[in-house]
Image: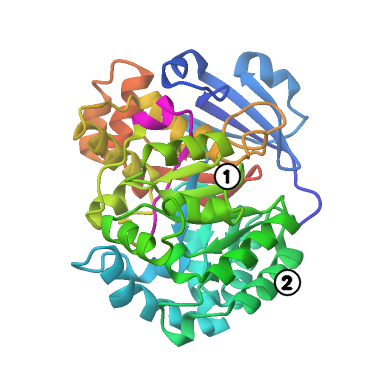
Amino acid sequence: MSSLIATTAVRGRFLDIQNTVAQAREIHDQVRYLEDGLLISENGQIRWFGHWEEGQHYLPDGLEVSHYPEQLIVPGFIDTHIHFPQTEMMGAYGEQLLEWLNTYTFPTEIQFQNPAYAKKIADFFVQELLKNGTTTALVFCTVHPQSVDALFEAATAQNMRLIAGKVLMDRYAPEALTDTAETAYTDSKALIEKWHGQGRNLYAITPRFAPTSTPEQLEKAGQLKAEYPDVYVHTHLSENHNEIAWVKDLFPEREGYLDVYHHYGLTGSKSVFAHCVHLEESEWDCLHQTDSAIAFCPSSNLFLGSGLFPLKKTWDKEVKVGLGTDIGAGTSFNQLQSLNEAYKVQQLQGEQLPAFEALYHATLGGAKALSLEDRLGNFNIGKEADFVVLELNATALQALRQSKAQSIEDTFFALTMLGDDRNIAATYIYGQARYVKA
């Protein structure tokens, strides 16, 4: 990573949420829309942000300004749950969670024992993130340490902020995909020492899910978290009814699925639990009390038939939540597509997902779920300059629909319903354009 990054300036229409909120109804008051704005970044940080008329006077002499007068610029999308090794198996047909893991996922992940193969997929994966406007992600690797190295190396080449970790799995999986309680600890410890806090890389202790870790391994995971309190915990929770029943059989001494993780010290402000579709009331309370976060993955929940996530409950219980694609059970890298699915999941429950709340979950709310709201998620001065330029009229249909948009809220809502990777005009990482649509 270069130690010095040049000053850059971007002009255009900007939309963001200025502050985190405790309740959805507060979001509207935090919306900031500049019809003609300017963002100046220096060394990857936002140095100045505001209206063009005022900001042009702060431009260094001779600095070229990238101007996007017809596009919409929003903070970079944040993906709070995704599996990079599953990229090549997206759209695998016909199974629910447990069968899907055995039929498709485990055979795919075995290939990552080959470092060259891991590098190939990691490079492809990072490019797909950029192509889809995702600037930060919380990522599952495989059980192989080389898969973690490959991913962080690919992210570092782009100056990208990723959180990732080696999977811990010492039972109920093919031998080529299992470690032990002890190797899980020693391999993870070495990877934390190597990668956590290096550049923009952050590490996550990553048990796949409770059934595939013995109590001994979960105890070692808790030991790691105690030794390195600044690292993350990333795992799955209550995605599928059969999975929940399996956990109860395997851990009869615990009060429920979340209590397994909580018992071993794996809940907390930097713990992110993917799915949480079927939580008990006491589990909602535990997530709130421990300041743990949920990754809402609508695309994969629908694809695997797991159920409908009660997003409104996260506000009622004041539990942090971010948006996840969950590639490869999810069917798109694109968070506009995730918001499309999220809207429908809420409609099926008689609830709504307003456009600005959708924007919040994909940006600042996701940053809060990852305890990164002080660094990411909007255009406040001092934040890291990660943002995406959205083409509003990427198709004839979109152009027709946008011509009838009544407000910036309507504009963004239509984008979430009709948009995909064709709408990503450019993705900026640390103030630099790392993807530009051809």
The residue shown at (33%, 71%) is: 101
Q: Earlier in the sequence, mark 1 or mark 2?
A: 2
Q: Nearer the viewer, residue 385 or 195?
A: 195
Mark 1 or 2, which is nearer the eye?
A: 2
Give the residue furthest to the front. Answer: 253
User: Residue 216 in magenta?
Assistant: no
User: What colour scheme has been applied to the protein in the rendered image?
Assistant: rainbow
* Residue 5 % position (x, y): 75, 47
Can residue 393 be seen at all in this image of the molecule? no
In percent of width and height, residue 389 lies at 48, 38
Give the residue displayed 72% in from the left and 58% down from the top. Answer: 196
Specify start and end residues of the magenta stretch as a single range.
312-327
Q: Is residue 106 left or right of residue 370?
A: left
Residue 285 picture location, percent across and down: 47, 35
Left or right of 254 on screen, residue 431: right
Q: Quadrant of the N terminus?
A: bottom right
Q: Nearer the viewer, residue 137 or 119?
A: 137
Name the residue type under label 1.
Tyr
In the depicted structure, whether residue 235 falls above or below residue 110: above
Kindly identify which numbered label has been placed on residue 349.
none
For the point 36% across and 73% down, which residue is it? 105
Task: From the image, tell me which residue sits under label 2.
Answer: 190
**SS for callout 1:** strand
Q: Which mark is residue 428?
A: 1
Q: Dot 1, how many residues are within 10 Å of its Cα: few (below 14), some (14-19), or many (20+)?
A: many
